Image: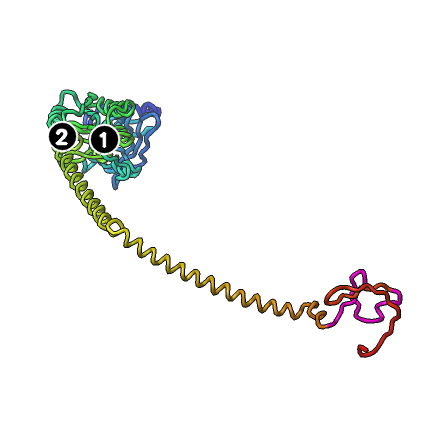
Amino acid sequence: MSNIYTVSDLTKYIKNLLDRDTRLMSVFIKGELSNFKAHYSGHCYFTLKDAGSQIKGVMFKSRAQFLKFEPRDGLKVVAYGQVTVFERDGQYQLYADQLIPDGVGELSLAFNQLKEKLAAEGLFDESRKQQLPLIPQAIGVITSPTGAALRDIITVAKRRHPGIPLILYPVQVQGLEAPGQIVEAIRAFNRLQNVEVIIAGRGGGSIEELWAFNDEQVVRAIAASSIPIVSAVGHQTDYTLADFAADSRAATPSQAAEMVVPDVYELKRYIQTLQTMLENTMRTYIKQRRQAVCQLRDNRVFTQPEKLLAEHRQLVDSYVERLEQAARNSILTKQQQLKLHAEKLAVLNPLAVLARGFSLTRTPAGQVISAANQVKPGQQLEIILNHGRLEVEVACVRESKNGY
């Protein structure tokens, strides 16, 4: 009973055994990630497993911050670190210093993961691309002040159009400080608005040396720029994420300068061509206008105006005769109608009846007397004759039948 241990003592004893094992101090373990969790503290917790077993692992912030890819469940990796015991839980686990994707390079995996993420956000859409200015007033250059890229850009720019100024914003193009400096350069040009287009790039190199142009913040700054940006990272076949986000991509800094800086001699030839086209167009237009004027001048309106007037005068005379004839016919018709109506009125005129010996009897009030029973003896009446009127007094009234 003398070898009785507490749980803590036994755990420490096992831990010491593992810690003294040189093979477990520095070990590579291949497996599949599961239950991966990035804690808010910056530490990463995961399980590494295969078909037969599993081991828990942890990568502290001091190491995790240098991961270039995003660990995900199901990803096959090779983990490097030390195997020891976590005393509180009494479990052995891996304290990882590195996680390396199995079968694919770490940078390649990080590149593809970030490309997929940013493409899903629409940062690489062609609809977001801006056109480069035809003749920029000034060109911004973001690159190393001592690199060959700057010398190439200056050489090409002076050859093509020495009158366009280049404004350099010097930055580191590789290393830990490079991404932040490139981002600040892009934002500075956008704040100042002192250039119309920006060339951002460097000479060629390995994927590690070019990695600053795959940095997420750099890519987002390029996509957010209101000034068109040409990505000019010196590599012919491979692409950086900056190439996808930029408004245009050049394979080399020299090519970028040729894209951005117009050839002054080509511009002169273009202007001369436009001038020739304008002159030819003006000559053709003037010739056409001259022909039109000549046609108008030769028109008989100007050459023989009297004939045109004679024709119109003859037409006027014809119209006058037709108008006079129509007026005469209208008057004759109206006269005939008037005569006919006058005859009808004459027949209906009561005065015409009086002319035949009849008379009209009525009261002083104007009431016409048509029967004897309408008057009384002694009543005053007025008799209207064809010529004159009689005022009479009724002496007697005698009614008769059948008008007698």
The numbered mark at residue 397 is: none
Badge 2 amino acid: Val
Residue closer to the observer: 170 or 83: 170
What span is colored magenta in the figure? 357-378
Residue closer to the observer: 384 or 43: 384
Element at badge 1?
Answer: strand
Q: Residue at x 49, y 64 (%)?
A: 330
Element at badge 2?
Answer: helix
Q: Residue farthest to the front? A: 387
From the viewer's perspective, tell me whether residue 174 is left or right of residue 398: left
Residue 125 shown in magenta: no
Residue closer to the observer: 333 or 238: 333
Residue 15 image offset from top left, x and y in percent: 27, 25
From the viewer's perspective, is the residue at label 2 or at label 1 nearer? Answer: 2
Q: Quadrant of the C terminus?
A: bottom right
From the viewer's perspective, tell me whether residue 269 is left or right of residue 90: left
Characterize the local packing of mark 1: few (<14), some (14-19) or many (20 or more) Cα atoms within 10 angstroms. Answer: many
Principal secondary structure, stretch drawn in magenta: loop
Residue 376 shown in magenta: yes
Residue under pointer 1 = 229
Residue under pointer 2 = 264
Residue 182 image offset from top left, x and y in percent: 23, 24
Tell me, yes or no, if residue 236 can be seen here: yes
